[in-house]
């Protein structure tokens, strides 16, 4: 009887692990939606001077390192932007692992020249 109870607990435990993994499956559509939200937040802010412009690394390549950099104005809600980017980066890492994604392992460089042009921060690289 003890063996039966232990076996039953083991099966229930294994099933609950499987359900939690399924709940964490990330789709390409989810990544695209998250990225659009980030871009919308950035696009809501403007600049009047290049000193207001900065950048943030986003995403993760399968080999490591960021997918790229987003340029934004200091007028953006920085805490919200960081939270969204962190969430996106974690989701992309999960997506890469779940789907066996490979990358070219190149590491993008941060933008060297950023300026305010027509009220928007842009990279000049």
Image (cartoon, rainbow, N blue to C red):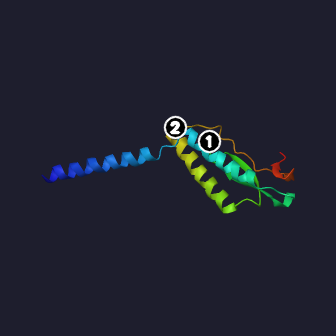
Q: Quadrant of the C terminus?
A: top right
* Secondary structure beneath label 1: helix
Mark nearest the camera among 2 and 1 is 1
Q: Which of the marked residues, 2 or 1, is nearer the chain's N terminus?
A: 1
Query: On the picture, is 7 further left or further right than 49?
Result: left
Write the residue at 54% across / 42% down. Answer: 95
Check whether the beta carbons of the residues at disc 2 and disc 1 lie within 8 A of each other: no
Foreground of the two, 71 or 61: 71
Residue at mark 1: 32
Residue 99: mark: 2
Write the residue at 79% across / 50% down. Answer: 111
Task: Give residue 7's position: percent from left, percent from top.
Answer: 21, 48
Whether residue 62 can be seen here: no
Write the residue at 22% across / 49% down. Answer: 8
Foreground of the two, 95 or 108: 95
Whether residue 44 can be seen here: yes
């Amino acid at each position: 009887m003890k063996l039966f109870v232990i076996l039953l607990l083991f099966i229930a435990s294994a099933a609950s692990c499987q359900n939690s993994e399924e709940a964490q499956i990330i789709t390409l559509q989810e990544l695209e939606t998250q990225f659009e939200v980030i871009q919308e937040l950035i696009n809501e802010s403007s600049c009047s001077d290049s000193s207001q412009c900065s950048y943030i690394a986003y995403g993760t390549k399968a080999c490591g390192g960021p997918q790229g950099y987003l340029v934004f104005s200091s007028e953006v809600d920085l805490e919200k932007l960081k939270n969204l980017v962190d969430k996106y980066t974690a989701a992309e890492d999960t997506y890469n692992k779940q789907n066996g994604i490979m990358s070219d392992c190149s590491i993008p460089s941060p933008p060297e020249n950023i300026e305010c042009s027509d009220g928007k921060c842009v990279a000049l690289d």
